[in-house]
Image (spheres, rainbow, N blue to C red):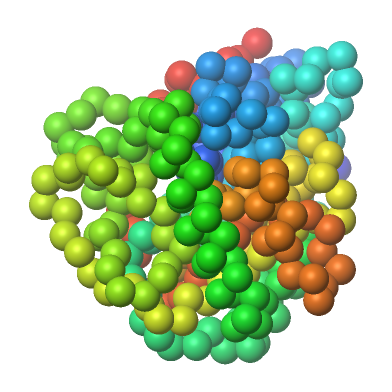
Amino acid sequence: MTAPPLDVSVVAAFVEDATAAPSQHNAQPWRFRFLGDSGVLQLYVDPERTLPKTDPDGRGMHLGCGAALFNLRVAAVAAGREPATRLLPDSSVPQLLAEVDLTGDASPGDDLALLHPAIRRRHTSRHPFREDDIPDALKDGLCAAARLEDARLVFPDAWHVQSVLDLVRDAEGREARYPEVRGETAHWARTEPADKTPASDGIPAEALGPRQWGADSPVRDFAVGREVPGRGWAPFEKRPQIALLGTAQDRRLDWLRAGQALERVWLQATLDGLVASLTSQPLEWPELRWVVRDPTTAMGHVQMVIRLGYGPEGAPAPRRPVADVLDIV
């Protein structure tokens, strides 16, 4: 059935939920355009918010935009709308990543709405996690969530976890040798508290977490070599629990699907009482990315390494105002 026309305030609320999604360095590389006559909401990449040194092929940017698209779908279903979605609808406009037709009523029994409360609760946690194991039932549910978005989530064995941690260290060493990459990271990582900076993007000091000592951890230190007032040190978990999110192929379409799968998994994990952080460092170097994959699985291309567990929730990161990312025509 065709639903009544959307009020602008409803569209703005959908976009506000969409922009709560994670993105690499919290660069928020998205823009939205609402076509009032057709009831279609378009998602575009914002070319001014790409990471040319860290993410030269735009894979990470597509993942972030895919995560925002998934939040949009969840918000629409929660409001009773059916988000009929087309990915990469026009090959002549590469900046246009998706179109979402919001003119229909949501299908009865669509469980996307159940994830809506987690959108505002989901934050990156760069704090130490407890050593408690994640129950197999929760792992199975997260793997099923990824499959619903045409992606695959696997929890590697202890040997492969250690190999991923070694690759993280390798990637850190490579980044240290490239000042242009370090400079790009420093640009987005703030060292001052959020209440002392007007930034509406990037990673605030409160979200950096403590510096780590002792056991290896896949948590990225965004302020390495920089002084952050009040930031301390802490031991991290000895047995990090990580999952690999991947796709069979490695096209722009697959990156968008992986971004949606990432957000679906993360929202479900949040409802399950888990916290998470992401590790993309070894995936940012082509010669390391292939080695990250688990050779015992059929996963073709790893799109993200996810650290999961039980621990403190992370601090919220700033978001751009809806007026800055939404055009209505």
- Residue at (26, 59) in percent of width and height: 211
User: Residue 60's spot in the image, x, y percent?
Assistant: 62, 39
How many labels sit on residues? 0
- Residue at (86, 68) in percent of width and height: 298
Q: Residue furthest left?
A: 230
User: Residue 214's spot in the image, x, y percent?
Assistant: 30, 74
User: Residue 189's spot in the image, x, y percent?
Assistant: 33, 37
Q: Residue furthest top?
A: 329
Question: Looking at this view, is 114 or 256 the one in front?
Answer: 256
Answer above or below: position of 48 versus 185: above
Question: Looking at this view, is 313 or 228 the one in front?
Answer: 228
User: Residue 185's spot in the image, x, y percent?
Assistant: 41, 35
Question: Looking at this view, is 197 or 182 the one in front?
Answer: 182
Quarter occupied by the C terminus? top right
Please indicate whether residue 138 sits to the left or right of residue 270 in the image: right
Q: Residue furthest front?
A: 177
Quarter occupied by the N terminus? top right
Answer above or below: position of 193 versus 245: above
Q: In which quadrant of the rendered view does residue 167 lie?
A: bottom right
Tell me if residue 312 can be seen: no
Q: In which quadrant of the rendered view does residue 215 lie?
A: bottom left
- Residue at (64, 29) in percent of width and height: 56
Please indicate whether residue 98 sits to the left or right of residue 10 in the image: right
Tell me if residue 28 can be seen: yes
Please indicate whether residue 84 sits to the left or right of residue 41 in the image: right
Q: In which quadrant of the rendered view does residue 85 lie?
A: top right
- Residue at (52, 50) in percent of width and height: 171
